[in-house]
Image: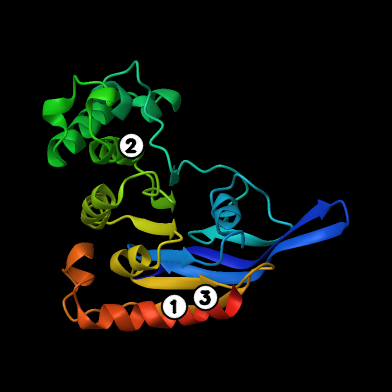
Amino acid sequence: MEDMLTVERISQTYQAENGELTALEEISFSVKEGEFVSIVGPSGCGKSTLLSIVAGMIRPTYGTVFLHGEPVTGISPSIGYMLQRDNLLEWRNIAQNAILGLEIRKQATPENIAYANSLLKAYGLWEFRDKYPSQLSGGMRQRAALIRTLAVKPEVFLLDEAFSALDYQTRLAVTDDVHRILKKEKKTTLMVTHDISESISMSDRVIVLSRRPAHIAKILKIDFADPDLTPLEKRKQHQFQDYFNTIWKELDVHV
């Protein structure tokens, strides 16, 4: 697999009252096509800032993000971004929410709308297409938000604490759902999370950041004997605790 996304020597410095504040320092890594990579680190270390830079929403002080070898200089239609909240519009039904991104991009062609409908059918929301967000569970709302992002056919998915607003039981179910959908659609994914278990259960690799100014403390390859295990099933494997302890120890050094 070739590298789809490359982060090269990213640094981010802010002007504070008492001088310059460095949030990120010399961050470099790559994500291969179809790979799922998570970023974890101490609270306030700049994880979400890094994701915003990858998305093209913030210009870094130094360094470059490349997509297919081309610099990302602004918000790219090839990059989809999911935040903590689903941000579904309450006055639009689920079918209408699913095509919102297409409408914004002026791409709501019959072909693209049919693709959005096929996603609703494939992932269990077609029978709820006429319902409104307030009538759906938290997990179903998050699935609808995922389909809305998939409908515009991004090559790279960015997830910023996308499940943190859900209760624990729902969160476990949704991570299974989202992981299955993204793997089936063969999407390259970069996720920021504070949840170590979530990062291990969903990822091919986990990038551990240090405290601020954040640099890469460790990159851990996650390799279970059966690659087809669901995130929930991975949590029950004996290697899971070893991975958890490794990441926890690394984070503990940088708290």
Residue at numbered disc 3: 251
Numbered disc 3: secondary structure: helix
Q: Nearer the viewer, residue 160 or 185?
A: 160
Relative to residue 161, is residue 6 depicted above or below?
Answer: below
Q: Look at 26% across and 21% down and name the residue there.
A: 132
Q: Is residue 22 visible?
A: yes
Q: Give the quarter of the image for residue 213.
A: bottom right
Pointer 2 local density, CA inside 10 Å: few below 14, some 14–19, many at least 20: many
Quarter of the N terminus within the rendering: bottom left
Q: Nearer the viewer, residue 94 or 101?
A: 94
Q: Is residue 230 visible?
A: no
In the picture as drawn, the residue positioned furthest to the right comes out as 18
Do residues under tags 3 and 1 come within 8 Å of each other at their CB atoms?
yes
State how far apart marks 2 and 3 are (Cα). Answer: 31 Å
Q: Position of residue 123 (x, y in %)?
A: 16, 41
Q: Look at 30% across and 40% down and name the residue there.
A: 142
Q: Earlier in the sequence, mark 2 or mark 3?
A: 2
Numbered disc 1: secondary structure: helix
Q: Position of residue 173 (x, y in %)?
A: 21, 51
State how far apart marks 2 and 1 are (Cα). Answer: 30 Å
Q: Position of residue 22 (x, y in %)?
A: 75, 63
Q: Look at 60% across and 44% down and name the residue there.
A: 57
User: Mark 2: which amino acid?
Assistant: Ala
User: Mark 1: which amino acid?
Assistant: Ile
User: Would residue 154 be found to the left or right of residue 71 on screen?
Assistant: left
Residue at numbered disc 1: 247
The image's mark for residue 196 is none
Residue at numbered disc 2: 145
Relative to residue 245, is residue 179 depicted above or below?
Answer: above
Q: Look at 74% across and 57% down and name the residue there.
A: 61
In the picture as drawn, the residue positioned furthest to the left comes out as 127
User: Would residue 29 be found to the left or right of residue 224 on screen?
Assistant: right
